[in-house]
Amino acid sequence: MPSNLKIILASGSQTRCMLLERLQLKFTTDPADIDESPLPDETPKQACIRLAASKAEHVQKRHPDALIIGSDQILECNGAMLGKPGNATKARAQLQTISGQEVVFHVGLTLIAPHGRRDWYEAVRVKMRQLDSDSINTYLQREQPFSCAGSMRSEGLGSALVESMHSQDPSAIMGMPMIATARCLRELGVDPLAG
């Protein structure tokens, strides 16, 4: 692997930037801006894997000599996919839907470098607290989670909505599994702990 390999995060997400900064690597961002609509008959797992790959592939076309990181997250509740709500009305409806439910955050990850590719999938199972209208209104007012899958901003006040969580990678609930990201980077020759 060339020592001057540029790392690009195919996202404009502040949370994903913050997560990647934890690895103390130099990187830039280039949001993919792709259509994130699910395909007909696509499962949440299939959708997040496809979207993570599509984001990385889209940005890789603009930066063929770089290492591109793409990630996507979809929340599933009772078989339904909940994406980014976009506004308070849809966010309120999503939070009412997931209140007291067991949900799954499906997270896809794709890293593409000139010399290889890694794909990863992580499922985070979450038991949501029972939420009343006041709690939902307070959460929406303080967090404004309109660009978060299922209106769930777990890196902030969203953690107060959770009863319990089960995952091999705790950061995955924030939209990018960092244990897997570090592993895939190492496999592609970029070791965050290298001197």
Image (cartoon, rainbow, N blue to C red):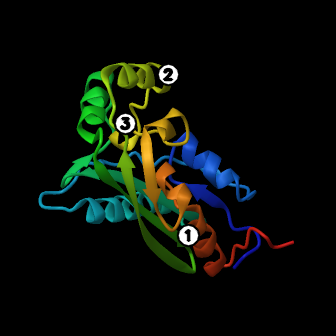
Q: Nearer the viewer, residue 90 or 154?
A: 154
Q: Which residue was labeled with disc 1?
A: 180
Q: In percent of the image, x 29 and y 64: which residue is there?
A: 45
| Mark pair 2, 3: CA separation | 12 Å
Tag count: 3
What residue type is disc 2 on?
A: Arg
| Mark pair 1, 3: CA separation | 24 Å
Give residue 74's mark: none
Residue 185 % position (x, y): 63, 72
Query: Could you tell me which secondary element the residue under label 2 belongs to?
Result: helix
Q: Which residue was labeled with disc 3?
A: 151
Residue 62 vertical position relative to residue 64 in the rendered view, above or below: above
Query: Could you tell me which secondary element the residue under label 3 belongs to?
Result: helix
User: Can I make out residue 6 in this image?
Assistant: yes
Q: In percent of the image, x 33 and y 52: which residue is there?
A: 74
| Mark pair 1, 2: CA separation | 31 Å
Q: Quadrant of the C terminus?
A: bottom right
Residue 184 vertical position relative to residue 159 in the rendered view, above or below: below
Label 2 or label 3, whichever comes before in sequence order: 2
